[in-house]
Amino acid sequence: MSEPQKTTMDTREVDKWLGVPLGGGQYRDDIHVNDVRRWAQGMQNPNPLHFDVDYAADSVFGQIVAPQSYTVNCTVGHGATPAIQGYIEGTHMLFGGDEWWFKGPRVFPGDLVTSDRMLYDYVVKETKFAGPTMFSRGDTNYLNQRGQVVGKQRSTSIRYYAEEAARRGGDYGEAREDPVWTQEQLEQIDAEKMEYYRSFLELGHEKRLFVEKGEKLPRRPIGPHTVATLTTEWRAYNMTIWGATYNEGESSTLEAGWIPEMSRDQEGAKIDPSNSDGLYKGPSRGHVQPEYARLIGMPRSYGYGATMGAWIMDYLSNWVGEHGWVIHSDMKYTGPAHTGDATYIDGEVTGVDHTRPDGPVANVAVRMTTQTGALMAKGDAQIQLPSP
């Protein structure tokens, strides 16, 4: 590995966008029940509340309802676009975390959700990964067709010089290759998945009434991740469907200074939409094409920050059940889900506030790790518990 070289980051173009209402992509059509089903499938979340019409009919909702995690699928760009403003040549981005607030209604098939956006703030720090690195935060408000705020997301983008990150990574050594799993190990993780799924199926339509400090949530295993699973996740985002969105207002996300290999061909897309698809050509191609992953400092194909957030949101929602919901979540992402790795989510109740006017609220500490114990994400969430 070559010695790190000091570089600088010119943020003058970013400053022009601070506090400015942003445009960007909006959906043309309302949400179809199959969009919700495809989301549950893509996020590997077999909770029948989100895909089984008969099961959902007996729920408190009386119909299929979108999981809270689906909210991030109600905008273009995973809610990260407001945090990617201002031109900085030769940069790329990774997700650094998401903070969510939910006070409004749930999302149902038939809803049409729009979003407004704004760059909130940023700071530049020196990192071992890529030298000068920008941690920028942007807000997205999600509103349904009745003007009700469904939720608010504050997403953190990590913007850095791709060439510098790739150079510091060297040849990546053994990290270039996926770990090998034995058949016995694969059978074990499948058994652990089934055990987790049973945990929320056994709760069913009942209320989770007895929660106390120190209670551990069931462990959720996901993976091992493959290019196939990453592609399935990507296609669960409706923004990847040709013609599903339109742009309104001003935003500089597409001209943020992406390296040429990660840029979208907007002119070519007028003939073949895959030229601006993002996954085939564009900023997301490194997720499933290892040669491009290495151009931006990743050793091999890797997952999406927004999906990590969805996994955690589903994990919390499945635990509390249909009579409760997540009212706030603040998660920091420290490493992506690489192909060949498995992901494990663990949670623990660290306190229950019984003084809230709407009923008790549990604080749950969450950790996401790989099969080797490497930390991928951590944070806290506040969950509204059902009243008796």
Image (tube, helix red, strand yellow):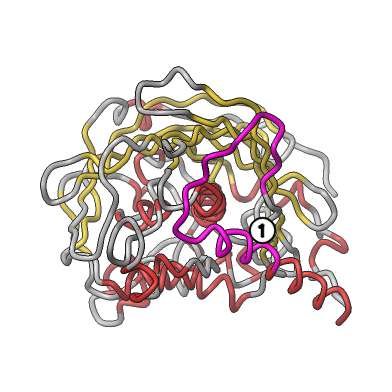
Name which residue type carries label 1.
Ala
Residue at coordinates 29% horizontally, 58% vertically from top-left?
A: 61
**Can you identify the residue that label 1 sits on?**
337
Residue at coordinates 43% horizontally, 61% vertically from top-left?
A: 263
Residue at coordinates 41% horizontally, 36% vertically from top-left?
A: 387
Q: Position of residue 130 (x, y in %)?
A: 67, 40
Counting the numbered discs, the total is 1
**Viewer-side residue, 167 vs 149:** 149
Image quadrant in which the C terminus is located: top left
In the picture as drawn, the residue positioned furthest to the top comes out as 355
Q: Which range is magenta?
A: 195-217
- Viewer can see residue 90: no
Q: On the rendered structure, is 306 left or right of 212?
A: left
Relative to 310, residue 339 above or below: below
Q: Where is residue 72 in the image (x, y as percent from the top left)?
A: 38, 52
In the picture as drawn, the residue positioned furthest to the left comes out as 146
Residue at coordinates 33% horizontally, 56% vertically from top-left?
A: 60
**Viewer-side residue, 308 vs 53:** 53
Q: On the rendered structure, is 349 left or right of 10?
A: right
Q: On the rendered structure, is 84 left or right of 227?
A: left
> Is residue 196 part of the magenta span, yes or no?
yes
Q: Look at the numbered disc 1 and give the secondary structure of its residue.
A: loop
- Viewer can see residue 181: yes
Q: Where is residue 325 in the image (x, y as percent from the top left)?
A: 42, 43
What secondary structure predominates along the stretch shown in magenta? Answer: loop
